[in-house]
Image: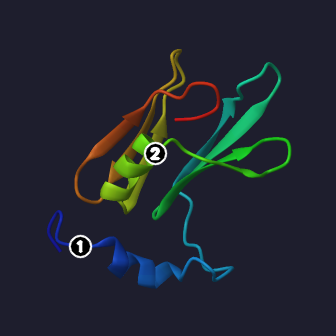
Amino acid sequence: MGVGSSSSKQLAKSFGEEEETGKRGPTLGSILLEGPEAGTWRLLLVSPLRVQIFNGHDAKAVELEEETLGALRRHTPFTAFCASKESPQRIAVGCQDGTVLVFNPSSGSL
């Protein structure tokens, strides 16, 4: 398979449908982000078919901005994840089509 010749639908077959449990595939990486208020935290989780953010207190999913969702949808599936340790923090997500998405998280979101 060459770069860009695969589709996320082919990869999705390996990891199950949205409703299936216990067949989600690997996690590429995760990181704790400071939340919007002092003393709050968010968990960013990156897997081949999704990028999700959860509230660190109650584990409820946090909605991503529409612009961010659009960029993620256009470049699924993801193949790599990296987070910088320096400030300001940057998060990079490698995509199967060769694109690298770089985010600057703020207030616990991308």
- 58 to 16, vertically: above or below: above
Label 1 and label 2: CA atoms lie apart by 25 Å
Q: Percent position (x, y) of residue 14? A: 46, 82
- Taking 7 as reference, is 67 above or below it? above
| Relative horizontal placement of residue 70, taking residue 50 as reference (left or right) | left
Q: What coloring was used for the rendering? A: rainbow
Does residue 46 show up? no
Q: Looking at numbered disc 2 in the image, what kind of residue is underneath it?
A: Glu
Precedes in sequence: disc 1 or disc 2? 1
On the image, which quarter does residue 31 sit in?
A: top right
| Relative vertical location of residue 27 with respect to residue 11 in this rendering, above or below | above
Q: Is residue 58 above or below residue 73?
A: above
Q: Which residue is mark 1?
A: 6
Q: Residues within 10 Å of mark 1 (few under 14, many from 20)?
A: few
Q: Which mark is residue 50?
A: none
Are circles 1 and 2 on residues that touch, CB within 8 Å?
A: no
Q: Position of residue 20 (x, y in %)?
A: 63, 83
Horizontal and vertical percent position of residue 2:
14, 68
Q: Residue at x 77, y 22 (%)?
A: 37
The structure residue drawn at horizontal position 68% and vertical position 80%, both measured from the top left corner, is 21
Q: Which mark is residue 66?
A: 2
Within 10 angstroms of label 2, few (less than 14), some, or many (20 or more) residues? Answer: few
Indicate the amino acid at tag 1: Ser
Tell me where residue 50 appears, x and y as whole percent: 50, 59
Asked if residue 49 shows in the view, the reply is yes
Quadrant that contains the N terminus = bottom left
The residue under the point 29% across, 60% down is 96
Say which residue appears at 22% left-offset and 52% top-offset. Answer: 98
For residue 15, side relative to residue 55 (left or right): left
Q: Circle 1 sits in a helix, a strand or a loop, which is it? A: loop
